[in-house]
Amino acid sequence: MSTTTSSIESLAARRASPCPTKIFKGHTKEVTCVAYFPDGRRLASASEDKTVIIWDVESGRQDGQPLQHDSNVSWMAISPDGRKITSGMDKGGAVVWDVLTREVVRDLKGGGVIRLAYSQDGRWIATVPWANERVVRLWDADTGRLGREPLICDGDPWCVAFSPDGTQIAVGLRDGSFEVISISTGESVVGPIKGHVDWVMSVVYSPDGRLFVTASADQSIRVWDSKTGVEVGKPMLGHEASVDCLSVTVNGRRIASGGDAVRVWDLETRLQVGESFHAAYGVICVAFSPDGRHIINGGGDNDVYLWDTETFAVQGSSPPPTTSNQNPTAPQPIPPLRQQRQARTKSHNDTSSINSSLLDLPAVVQQQPATQSPQERRPSVDDNWDTESIRPRLVSVHGIFCMVPSHSCAF
C-alpha cells in the first residue's frame, strides 16, 4: 500500500468529534489566555505575538485594533466592570488598559508576569512573577501602586485566584502544593498542602467560596474545602497530559478544564459531561461564557475556538483514564512553560448532537480508578474548515485533496 493511500485511510479512520461554532483568527503566535467580558458580548485573547485582541462574539470580528505590547503577553484579566484589561508580559511587568480609549492607564512596574487575577470587587490585582520568586504581589487597581507588602509563599507560585469575598487568595505552587493566604495579615490560613505530585497549573474558587479546584501537571483535577484544605470527593481523571487551565460556571455546577482537550465536569459528581472538545494543537487556556452556554479556548495553533455546549450529545463519552494517569504517584519533571508548549504543538490531537445544554445534561458515568483518599495523603504544614456552512471541507493529504464531511472535524 502506498504512503498516500495509507495517509488517506488514516485520516478517514479518525473518529468524529464535535465542531467549534466559530474560530477567531487574527493572532500570529500561540494564544496564552482567553476571557469573556461580563456582558458576554465580547471576549479578549492574549498571545505571544505581543497583542491582546478584543472580539465581537456575534460577528466573530475584531473590535478595534489589537492592544500592542513590548513583549509576549503571558496572561491577562478583564476587570469585573469590563472597563479595564490588565495584561502581564513575560518581560516588563503588567499594564492596565482602558477598554474604551485603548490606552495604557496604569503601569505595574516589575519583572515578568506569568499569571494575574482581579479580585471580584475590582480593588486588587494579583500578579505572579515569572522568575522563581516566592511572592505574590498585590496592586491597587485604581492607582497602579503596590497595595501592601508582597504575600510570601512557601514555594514558587504559578497560579492564583481570589476568594469571592476578596479576603483571601489561593496560590498554586510549582512543587504540587497549594496554600491560602489572608490578604489582610499576609499569613497562610490553609496549608501549604502537598495535594499533587507535580506543578499546580491552575486554581479556581466555586462561586460561593466554599470550595476551590486545582489542576495539575500530574493530569488530575482535585477539589478542596477552602477553610480546611481537606480534599472533597474523588479527583477528576481523564486528561492524558498536563491539565493547564480551569474555568467554572457562575452557578458553580460545571468545571471546564484544558490540556490535551477541553473537558467539562460535573462539580458535584466529579464525572465528565458530554464529549471532549478537541482543538488542533492542545489547549492552553479556557473560559466559560457568563451564561455557561459557550466555552472558548486558545492554544498553540494561534486561533481562538468557540464551542456551543448545546450541540453536544452525552453518548460516546470520552474513554476512561489511561494507565498513565490512573495512579499519579510519581512526579514527572515539567519543562519550562515555553518548552512545554512547543513540545505539545509538535503533534496533532485527534479531534452527535441533541438539543440540550451541558448545563442541564446528566453526567456521563465513567469508571473511576481507585485513588488515595484524603486521609492516605499526608498534608504538610497549588483549520481549516468552513464554519459558516455545512459544506464538506477539503483536506490536502500529500497533495491529494479529500472531501471530509463537516461533522467529523478531524484535524
Image (cartoon, rainbow, N blue to C red):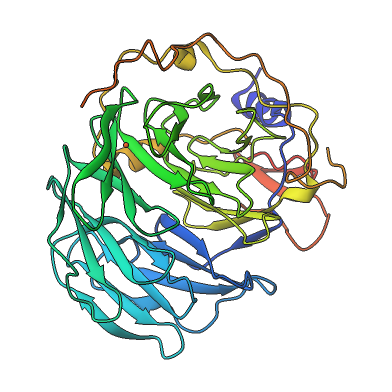
Residue located at (54% from left, 70% from top): 37
Residue located at (68% from left, 74% from top): 59
* Outermost bottom residue: 101
Whole-percent x, y for residue 292 in the image: 67, 55
Q: Is residue 1 above or below residue 119?
A: above
Residue located at (53% from left, 50% from top): 208
Q: Nearer the viewer, residue 236 or 205?
A: 205
Whole-percent x, y for residue 177 in the image: 27, 31
Q: Is residue 103 above or below residue 165?
A: below
- Decide if residue 17 is on the left or right side of residue 232: right
* Outermost right residue: 355
- Decide if residue 84 is on the left or right side of residue 199: right
Q: Is residue 47 above or below residue 271?
A: below
Residue located at (23% from left, 72% from top): 70
Residue 118 visible here = yes
Q: Nearer the viewer, residue 339 or 347?
A: 339
Q: Quadrant of the C terminus?
A: top right
- Decide if residue 106 is on the left or right side of residue 62: left
- Residue 241 image-quadrant placement: top left
Number of marks drawn: 0
Q: Quadrant of the N terminus?
A: top right
Q: Is residue 314 above or below residue 146?
A: above
Residue 406 visible here = no
Whole-percent x, y for residue 2 in the image: 63, 22
Whole-percent x, y for residue 166 in the image: 37, 59
